[in-house]
Amino acid sequence: DLVLAAVGDIMIHSPQIAGAYLESEGRYDFQENFSYISSYLKEADFVIGNLETTLAGEEYGGYSGYPLFNSPPELACVLKNSGFDLLITANNHSLDRGSAGIINTINNIGEAGLNFVGTARSLEERKKGYLLTHNGIKAAFFAYTYGTNGLPIPPGQDYAVNLIDEQLISEDISRAKINYGADIIVICMHWGNEYQRVPSDRQRELAKKLIDLGANIIIGSHPHVIQPAEIMETEKGAGLVFYS
């Protein structure tokens, strides 16, 4: 079997950055932020969460919270120590520090021993998604966002952030099944309306289309509150949907 755990939006606001700073040591420590949940996460085989901030480095406009997020790279190490395995990097804050922010975020995630999905440094990397093999089960993970807060994806770098595009998602799912032999397709969607406790019509419509395309599990983020979960059955299949 495979026990998968997921959390919602991981974001660090300015007061949290200030609160995590250890002045005597000149570094940041976010471990306390995850102290209440890490024991639960470590019971799972694989843990994912939406990293809704960049880890671009202090030299890229300093560390900040809303509206343009950039958190200390130490956050990635704490996430690793707290039990996380895979961070979703496709969300409306992906481009808060431009293309350099995307690249540095990916690099800092990797240096912490974590994996990522949703942004990419190349087209080849984008197409791959994230592939997991556990106890003989092959699972493919892909992540997409509704947008990037109006910040344009750099010309010639369409691969940098996965936007919600049904054709793109269809191709990704097909590739994972045919080329990789994936048993399970997990689609992570940054969608919906903030602070709304019920999914929008658009979320439900997209969920149905994703299941028709072959998704088995859909994990939503962005609303910042818990929304319902359901097993959705369509004419072409069935899937488990966590709207947020």
Image (tube, rainbow, N blue to C red):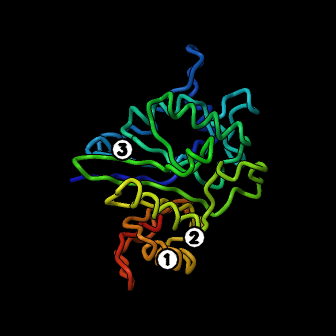
To which quarter of the image does residue 41 belong? top left
Q: Earlier in the sequence, mark 2 or mark 3?
A: 3
Work out how far the residue at label 3 is from the one at label 1, CA to CA, in angstroms: 33 Å
Q: Earlier in the sequence, mark 1 or mark 2?
A: 2
* Contact flag, marks 1 and 2 (Cβ < 8 Å): yes
Mark 3 lies on residue: 37
Q: Residue at x 50, y 49 (%)?
A: 128
Q: Which mark is residue 209?
A: 1
Residue 242 location (% of width, % of height): 42, 66
Mark 2 lies on residue: 166
For marks 3 and 1, give the one nearer the viewer. Answer: 1
Q: Is residue 234 above or below residue 92?
A: below
Look at label 3 and name its amino acid: Ile
Look at label 1 and name its amino acid: Lys
Image side of residue 116 versus residue 37, left or right = right
Q: Secondary structure at mark 2?
A: helix
Q: Earlier in the sequence, mark 3 or mark 1?
A: 3
Residue 36 location (% of width, % of height): 36, 42
Work out how far the residue at label 1 is from the one at label 2, CA to CA, in angstroms: 8 Å
Closer to the camera, 190 or 163?
163
For marks 2 and 3, give the one nearer the viewer. Answer: 2
* Contact flag, marks 3 and 1 (Cβ < 8 Å): no
To which quarter of the image does residue 152 belong? bottom right
Q: Secondary structure at mark 3?
A: loop
Residue 124 location (% of width, % of height): 57, 46
Q: Residues within 10 Å of mark 1 (few under 14, many from 20)?
A: some
